[in-house]
Amino acid sequence: GLTEWAVRTAPSQIIIYNREGNKAMEVGGNNTYFGPGPTNTYHMDIYKEERRKPITKDNENVAKVCDYLKNIDFVMDLGTPRDVTPILSDVYAFKAMVNNTKKPIVHWGFDMDQYNDIVEIAAAVAGGLEELQKRPFLALYSESSPPLVHSAEAINKAIFAAKKRLPIIYTPCVISGATSPATLAGTIAQGLAESLPGVIVSQLIKEGSPIIIGGVYGIMDMKTTIYSYGSPEFQALQAGVAEVAHYMKMPVFGTAGCTDSHILDAQAAAESAMSILMAASSGANIVHDVGYTAAGATGSLFQLVMGDEIIGMVRRIINGFKVDEYTLAVDEVVKAKPGGEHITSMHTYKNFKDETWFPNFMDRWRYSEWKTMKGAKSMGDKIKEKTREIVENYEAPHLSEKVLKDIDSILQKAEEREAKKYEKTHKKKK
């Protein structure tokens, strides 16, 4: 049938590059890449430690922090800026990100005009649309509207991406017990059914068009009515979706590094760790929402930086260890003899750095050293200090003045277009 044909023709692996045209992510198989999420209503101020409305400076800082963190692989905006023309906030957020990171960007758009603006900016950065198509550093994003509704806007975005030969993530955000069945299996079945029309449309436009399925699958907490980002069911659903996508041989979009907690605390750490471990274990490919707090309402750089530490820890677990004649080190065991030691062994010196993961924020000092030498700081204290240090001191890899002028020209045209549309609508109302 049509659906089976579309799934077969869609690519099982998609290569996404960085801003400089170097291969950055091989999206497919069990390769897992982590990054923040988009469109949060609030942003956690890193100095006042209170939530507020996001601004474009926050998008710049998110990109800068992502560029610095070695376990964060791609960038999303972590908040819709409120200090610009509202209908163009998606475009301004993209400019803020692309000017502050070399890493790949996953981004959304309000409508087709904004999609065009964003791709035009990306093409200006890449050196033209053809160069962007050859080495895309941008993956577009579109969502259905559960249950089982696909707006013209959502489908048009899938068509647009296929025509532009750019990767797109086409997913639902399903809420078990609210917009999907209360059973987890039913939620996965409905959610995947909602991804497939995007696959069909993209392949009808052009066979082999790069498209990624998956999404955000969770439950509604029946006590508070929030969409829970920290529930065990949330983790199980993400793993289930990844499993089915692997069976279909399609790249999958996942979710992790998020929490229902409002602050950087034990709950935030526990929920983040569980979801990151589950995402990596299940082989989800592009895993977003690292840095989400308050059930997705608030974007937090503290949560993002903590997520980087947890991702590093989880990757060490997932990578496992090599077993061969050298690593079994039988000769070393014999050499040390009963009652001996391996601390002074050259074998230890050569191998301990490769075999052992070292944390940046988790504490391993003895109590007396932690108290007297390390200032008795908690993990949270250290994360907050490091976050502020990155924002204040890290030199982001900015674009050239020429490219920035081209981007500003695109934004100016977009402002003029939206002003005309507003004026036309306003006159009709009068």
Image (cartoon, grey):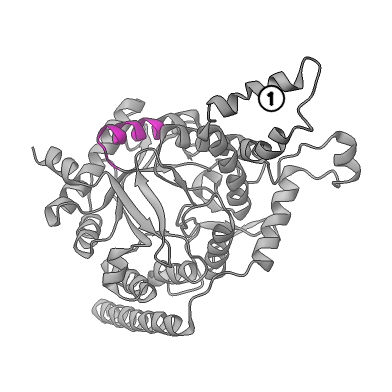
* Residue where numbered disc 1 is placed: 332
Task: Tell me if residue 252 is in the magenta stretch.
Answer: no
As displayed, is residue 315 above or below residue 72? above
Give the image location of residue 402, x and y in percent: 44, 85
Q: Is residue 410 left or right of residue 209?
A: right
Start and end of the magenta stretch? 237-250
Find residue 428 and report its image quarter: bottom left
Can residue 281 be seen?
A: yes
Q: Is residue 83 left or right of residue 146?
A: right
The answer to if 243 sits in the magenta stretch is yes
Q: Where on the picture, by quarter, is residue 194?
A: top left
Crowding near the residue tagged with mark 1, few <14, some 14–19, many ≥20 C-alpha atoms within 10 Å: some
Q: Is residue 428 above or below residue 61?
A: below
Is residue 170 visible in this depiction of the protein?
A: no
The majority secondary structure of the magenta stretch comes to helix
Residue drawn at (66%, 45%) of the image: 264
User: Residue 220: image x %, image y %?
Assistant: 43, 35
Q: What residue is drawn where x is 32% and y is 69%?
A: 119
Q: Secondary structure at mark 1?
A: helix
Q: Position of residue 180 (x, y in %)?
A: 31, 34
| Relative vertical location of residue 268 with respect to residue 388 in this rendering, above or below | above
How many numbered callouts?
1
Q: Residue at x 29, y 28 (%)?
A: 186
Q: Amino acid at mark 1?
A: Glu
Q: Between 219 and 301, which is closer to the camera in this rendering?
A: 301
Toward the left, the furthest residue is: 1
- Residue placed most toward the observer, 315 or 294: 315
Residue 369, image x, y percentages = 88, 40
Is residue 323 left or right of 349 when viewed as pictured?
Answer: left
The one of 6 and 103 positioned closer to us in this rendering:
103
